[in-house]
Image: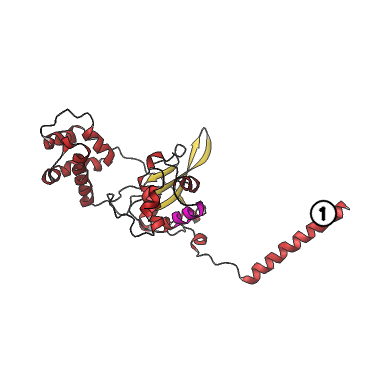
């Protein structure tokens, strides 16, 4: 069902971008993509999560835009995003910036294929190191999968399982330096000669020759978490669980029935008084 609904949507490559500085941001240190990343979610949430996962950073993932590109209405998408937030896959945040001397807010939605709890999200969004890191085994597995896929992209780069294993550590070093799968694949397959006599040696040489430089330390950015549902910040940037405030999560108690009736009576009385005042003025 989820796959069939996704097939009706535009491909992620056709999805519009948000304004510069806004939109989707991918969370770091995610587990490699598999075919079972969202099987723990209901069908609707799983299909939307799979679509979000394939979008590039800075994609416009507002409710209105998603409703134009997915087979769901705005209310359904809003509810699904709340559920994805509670399940640990996304957080809405904002941070203050200054543009031409004027302060303004920049809004992002962080998305993580790997579900994380508040113990991971809170320190990460506060500019601290995440509590958990991508395991070395997962990095090596992702590297192995990319190497094995090269032969399906271009038969000249077909590697055996043993050769993939021998090159796995070299490919994993690309990920350790911040490169993504697409960047690694592009470096391997671009500008190939007409014939590659020895695929293993060719790929090994390119892995070493085109290895990206080690990234410079980046000053962490502090974000203010806002409620996924209502967009309001929590108390002092916190006070939320699963990215939802108490009210939107249902934790805030409603008013007693007698107070609701009394308040409604006051509003009706005020309306009647205002109507009589207007009629008297008109006379």
Q: Position of residue 179 (x, y in %)?
A: 27, 39
Query: Which residue is drawn at the image coordinates 38% and 48% (left, top)?
Result: 7
Please give left or right for residue 282 compared with residue 96 in the image. right
Q: Main secondary structure of the magenta part?
A: helix
Please name the residue that numbered disc 1 is placed on: 278
Q: Position of residue 279 (x, y in %)?
A: 84, 55
Work out which residue is located at the far right of the displayed protein and give it.
283
Query: Which residue is drawn at the image coordinates 14% and 33% (left, top)?
Result: 202
Please give left or right for residue 103 compared with residue 116 in the image. right
Please give left or right for residue 114 compared with residue 270 in the image. left
Q: Position of residue 65 (x, y in %)?
A: 48, 44
Viewer-closest of 220 and 36: 36
The answer to whether residue 213 of the structure is visible from this angle is no
Residue 241, above or below 55: below
Magenta stretch: includes residue 77 = yes
Give the total number of marks visible in the rendering: 1
Q: Position of residue 3 (x, y in %)?
A: 36, 52
Label 1 crowding class (10 Å Cα cut-off): few <14, some 14-19, many 20+?
A: few
Disc 1 element: helix
Image quadrant where residue 186 sits: top left
Magenta stretch: includes residue 203 = no
Magenta residues span 72-82
The answer to whether residue 205 of the structure is visible from this angle is yes
Judging from the image, the colouring scheme is: secondary structure
Q: Quadrant of the N terminus?
A: bottom left
């Amino acid at each position: 069902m989820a796959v069939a609904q996704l097939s009706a949507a535009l491909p992620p490559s056709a999805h519009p971008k948000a304004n510069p500085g806004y939109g989707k941001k991918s969370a770091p240190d995610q587990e490699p993509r598999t075919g079972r990343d969202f099987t723990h979610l209901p069908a609707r949430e799983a299909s939307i999560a799979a679509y979000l996962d394939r979008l590039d950073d800075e994609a416009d993932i507002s409710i209105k835009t998603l409703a134009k590109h997915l087979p769901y209405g705005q209310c359904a998408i809003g509810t699904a995003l709340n559920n994805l937030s509670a399940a640990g896959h996304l957080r809405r945040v904002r941070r203050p910036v200054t543009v031409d001397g004027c302060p303004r807010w920049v809004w992002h939605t962080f998305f993580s294929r790997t579900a994380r709890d508040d113990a991971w999200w809170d320190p990460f969004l506060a500019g601290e190191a995440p509590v958990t890191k991508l395991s070395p085994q997962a990095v090596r597995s992702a590297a192995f999968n990319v190497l094995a896929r090269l032969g399906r992209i271009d038969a000249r780069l077909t590697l055996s399982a043993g050769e993939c294993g021998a090159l796995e550590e070299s490919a994993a070093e690309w990920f350790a330096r911040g490169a993504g799968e697409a960047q690694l694949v592009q470096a391997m397959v671009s500008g190939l000669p007409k014939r590659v006599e020895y695929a293993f040696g060719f790929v090994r040489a390119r892995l070493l020759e085109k290895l990206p430089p080690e990234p410079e330390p980046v000053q962490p950015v502090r974000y203010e978490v806002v409620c996924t549902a209502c967009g309001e910040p929590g108390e002092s940037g916190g006070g939320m669980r699963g990215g939802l405030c108490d009210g939107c999560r249902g934790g805030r108690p409603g008013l007693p029935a007698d107070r609701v009736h009394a308040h409604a009576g006051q509003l009706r009385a005020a309306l009647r008084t205002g109507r009589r005042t207007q009629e008297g003025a008109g006379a």
